[in-house]
Amino acid sequence: MSEDPKASRRSLLGGLVGVGACALGAAVAAPVVVFVAAPAGASPKSGERFVRTVPLDSLAVGKPVLVNLVGKDTDAWTTHPAIELGSAWLVRTGPREVRALSSTCPHLGCAVQRDGDGFTCPCHTSAFGVDGKRKEGPAPRDLDELAVRIDDGVVAVDFKRFRIGVAEKVQVG
């Protein structure tokens, strides 16, 4: 008994459509799986993000200098090679010693400004000594100190952000 040629063509066409649909589904699903799984498979950051700032020799002992912290920032899928991360006050305290203080007021996040022998917050009048210690105002803690190292005569600051409005120094992001 011979097969119906129309039924044979329909079976072949149905098979080809099924294979094509599977191939199309796989082509769409593969990038989606990679996109979703990439951050989960990324290696965790060391927690340090040292940003090179100014030559150590450019800092005078006891004279705060505001520096912009420009460095690489990476979110889940995008790397920004040179983006302003924030700023910090650098205070040279010795021949090879520098203190870095976040320029963000721990009260509500305003940028602190140099004022005489220390810093003030223009938003709510918090005042801090040149060492970052809270003198007065509503700020719940001292200015946040950032880790510093000297790399080939250049001051590098470990950029971090901290929760504002709380007494404890809690790192965020």
Image (cartoon, helix red, strand yellow):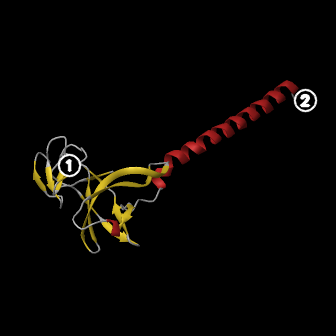
Q: Looking at the image, which residue is at 61% across and 39% down?
A: 28
Q: Looking at the image, which residue is at 65% across and 41% down?
A: 27
Q: Judge whether residue 141 can be spotted in this image.
A: no
**Is the residue marked by circle 2 packed among few (<14), some (14-19), or many (20+) residues within 10 Å?**
few
Q: Mark 2 points at which residue?
A: 2
Q: Is 87 or 57 nearer to us in this picture?
A: 57
Q: Mark 1 points at which residue?
A: 106
Q: Looking at the image, which residue is at 54% across and 45% down?
A: 33
Determine the image quadrant of residue 53. Answer: bottom left
Q: Looking at the image, which residue is at 22% across and 47% down?
A: 164
Q: Is residue 3 left or right of residue 96?
A: right
Q: Please determine whether, in this image, residue 128 is positioned above or below residue 60.
A: above
Q: Is 1 or 135 nearer to us in this picture?
A: 135
Q: Quadrant of the N terminus?
A: top right
Q: Is residue 68 left or right of residue 128?
A: right
From the top left corner, tell me how far across and down residue 172 is, in percent.
29, 51
Q: Disc number at residue 20?
A: none
Q: Is 53 or 168 nearer to us in this picture?
A: 53
